[in-house]
Amino acid sequence: MRRGTKLAAASLGAVLSLSMAACGGDDGGSGAASGDPLSGVSITVGSKDFTENILLGEMWAQALSAAGADVTNDTNLGGTEVNRQALTSGDSTTYPEYNGTGWTVHLGNEDPSQDPQELYDVTAEQDLADNNIKWIGLSPFNDTYGFAANGDLAEQEGGFDFDSMAAYLESNPDATVCMETEFPDRPDGLVLWENATGYELPTSQQQILDTGLIYTETADGACDFGEVFTTDGRILELNLELVDDPGVMILYNVSFTMDNDVYEANAETYDEIADTILADLDEEKMADLNKQVDIDAIPAEKVAEDYLKDVGLL
């Protein structure tokens, strides 16, 4: 894997090795037979520029390298549009993407399903037909937008759901919600909460902050509520309490998106690797991995490597 240096390919876990061995019987010198099913394949792996997506990109890059691919690691490439443009232009081969983003942003659709498998299915089908992009695997975790309450306030009020949060804000005009700059204007942001609760949050109750400050300011009580990503490890670490979402916010389960021509050449290998990476990633596990990077200051490369060892891919 290239990031200035190249990682030596490691052996894959038993599940992948056995499956590839069954496919490689014709040629004793093939990459599959030697345990390197992606030998000779060049892949550029990108990711978005926030912890969770960087971690997923690192897992994908390291696992593909372990399967024999010559991997160029372009994780932490930039935002959503930068990664998508790199993929569709051929500058990148693959990166982790979320089904809600695919359906609404990349494909320009509305009214996404609240069933993660259904949303994946329709997104994957349309993106393949329209853009020759393959969606591989589907995570159990859903990293959607949400709100977290200050821990002391949540304990005092007995916790919050969307409706009780709105009622509290309406009856306490000095209470505030901290959020990122774009959240009040995003079609998948504040407007969904406002439509669901019937309370239009006045600008006087909106406090715009950088993402990282939202968590600490909410924990310190400077904000009563904060806009959060639901798998962010800082929620638990800072004793914040998620506001219960009755199914309002758009789903964001993750898959690996890839140029379909590359995928088709080794489809079974990519499927097995992706499924092995994603199978154990529920909300709690993903939040813990994010915490290891954001709170414990462990490098993302190391967290990804340890996780791949745990699931048998290294």
Image (spheres, rainbow, N blue to C red):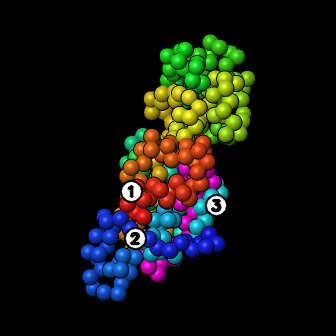
Numbered disc total? 3
Sequence-first disc among 1 and 3: 3
Local SS, label 2: loop
Q: Which mark is residue 311?
A: 1
Disc 1 vs disc 3: which is toward the camera?
1
Asked if the residues shown at circle 1 and circle 2 are in contact, with their CB atoms under 8 angstroms apart, the answer is: no
- The Cα atoms of the two marked residues, 1 and 2, are separated by 13 Å
Question: Horizontal and vertical percent for residue 62?
Answer: 50, 65
- The Cα atoms of the two marked residues, 3 and 2, are separated by 28 Å
Is residue 53 shown in magenta? yes
Question: Horizontal and vertical percent for residue 30?
Answer: 36, 84
Query: Is residue 79 something that shows in the picture?
Result: yes
Disc 3 vs disc 2: which is toward the camera?
2
* Residue named by callout 2: 11
Amino acid carrying mark 1 in the image = Val
**Residue 122 higher or lower than 177, as above or below:** below
Amino acid carrying mark 3 in the image = Leu
Give the residue at the far top of this rendering.
171
Side of 224 where 195 appears, left or right? left
Amino acid carrying mark 2 in the image = Ser
Front in this rendered view, residue 135 or 2:
2
Front in this rendered view, residue 219 or 266:
219
Q: Which mark is residue 71?
A: none
Mark 1, residues whose alpha carbon is within 10 Å: few (<14), some, or many (≥20)? some
* Residue named by callout 3: 77
Asked if the residues shown at circle 1 and circle 3 are in contact, with their CB atoms under 8 angstroms apart, the answer is: no
Question: Horizontal and vertical percent for residue 165?
Answer: 56, 21
Mark 3, residues whose alpha carbon is within 10 Å: few (<14), some, or many (≥20)? some
Front in this rendered view, residue 5 or 184:
5
Task: Identify the magenta region.
Answer: 38-59
Front in this rendered view, residue 68 or 136:
68
